[in-house]
Image: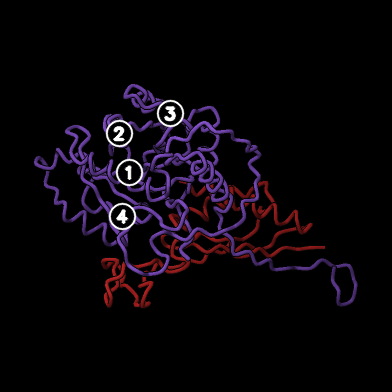
Chain colours: A red, B purple
Amino acid sequence: MHEYSLVEALVTRVEAEAKKRDAIAVHKLSVRVGELSGVDPELFQTAYETFRAGTICAGVPLTLTRVAASWSCPRCRTPIARGAILRCPACDTPGKLDDGSDALTLDGIEMEVP
Amino acid sequence: MCTTCGCGDTELVPVELHEKILAGNDRAARHNREHFLEARVLALNLMGSPGAGKTAVLEATAKAAAAKGWRLGAVSADLATDNDARRLQKAGIPSKAITTGQACHLDAELVHRSLHDFPWRDTDMFFIENVGNLVCPAIYDLGQAANVVVLSVTEGEDKPLKYPVMFNAADLVLLTKCDLVPHLDVELAKIHDALARVMPRPRMIEVSARTGQGMDAWVAWLEELRDGIGLGGADAHAHGHEHSHAHSHEHAHGDERHSHAHSHDGHEHEHGSADHHGHARGGKHDHD
């Protein structure tokens, strides 16, 4: 259940950004959750809904976008099938995780500024 | 303000950030990593399920390290007790407990705070024994040189497939309690196969803390890692130098992205452990 500490980091970051821009309110948050980010999207959403009370994010909807994990060959770009041994089927190079597969990213904040 | 007609209405602005939510932890981890490298201490993050044998492996490592003349140190995270730290202390490893309360993992800031009143600079190898958990600790970079995941033979052959995030983060898997293999229906080949589906460069050492099996291979791995990041050699004991770094916790360390040692150029060489590019690896670096 590290989702709470991640939500805390998220809300702290949003508060800092809102302060920096003298925002009156925050309207929307969007976060991307990679399949191998170690984060359960449902738990993250629940944690957010609990934690946001009393913060600048109270009542602010959070849009989560899931990113499926995928592997490919860093040399010849051949994709490696899901669940397969992580070596390139064409040239046997050890695979590399594609961008976003293991990331938990705050994509954007929509805020109201004076 | 609304600039179209000057009516004084507020404006909605989309702020694009594309920033890692763990950016704060990653900054703290970089800070720890710089400290470890500068003090020439090899830091390792030891993770695994409760009861996998993390503490027992360290106890057995103490014996092997004594023969090498290595000075070990450890911080041991536990939700409620300091039992593990006391066990390590008894085994001759200066140790300190980090009691995390309800927290299921260590983060870089907790590790940093634990260093403040612990003589970690006087060690050659510093083990961070994480909270027993195969989920949460995997995503927090602590500033370690490498992640070691301890998996015992009694846990089931498909553990790597069930916890891909943890095993994907591993630089080495220590398969523990191997003395029990004759008494179990476990097939080690199945564990190897599962690992190869979650780790692009699977590396596993079979050990038994009880019989000492595999401890030489584990020690050799540590030595190779230490030499690979430039902490070995004749001047490896240059500890205790003046250190004038203020612990303000707010350093601008730049936002350099560590590329993972295993994925820099797609050119294949089996560097079992060490990064040839001068910085320590481990943790959740960006895969550039």
- In the displayed structure, does residue B190 sit left or right of residue A48? left
Chain of the residue on which disc 3 is drawn: B
- Residue at mark 2: B68
> What's the mark number on residue A38?
none
Query: Which quadrant holds residue B3?
Result: bottom right
Residue lying at 26% horizontally and 75% vertically, measured from the top left: A89
Mark closest to the chain's N terminus, 4 or 1: 1
Mark pair 2, 3: CA separation: 34 Å
Q: Residue B219: x and y, percent?
A: 28, 41
> What's the mark number on residue B272?
4
Compared with B95, B161 (above or below) is: below
Q: Amino acid at mark 2?
A: Lys
Q: Is residue B83 visible?
A: yes
Mark pair 4, 1: CA separation: 11 Å
Mark pair 3, 4: CA separation: 36 Å
Mark closest to the chain's N terminus, 3 or 4: 3
SS of the residue under disc 2: helix
Mark closest to the chain's N terminus, 3 or 1: 3
Chain of the residue on which disc 2 is drawn: B
- Residue at mark 3: B80
Crowd around label 1: few <14 · some 14–19 · many ≥20 (10 Å): some
Chain of the residue on which disc 4 is drawn: B
Mark pair 3, 1: CA separation: 33 Å
- Residue at mark 1: B223
Mark pair 1, 2: CA separation: 10 Å
Q: Amino acid at mark 3?
A: Ala
- Do the residues marked 1 and 2 share a common chain? yes
Chain of the residue on which disc 1 is drawn: B
Q: Residue lying farthest front?
A: B234
Query: Which quadrant holds residue A61?
Result: bottom right
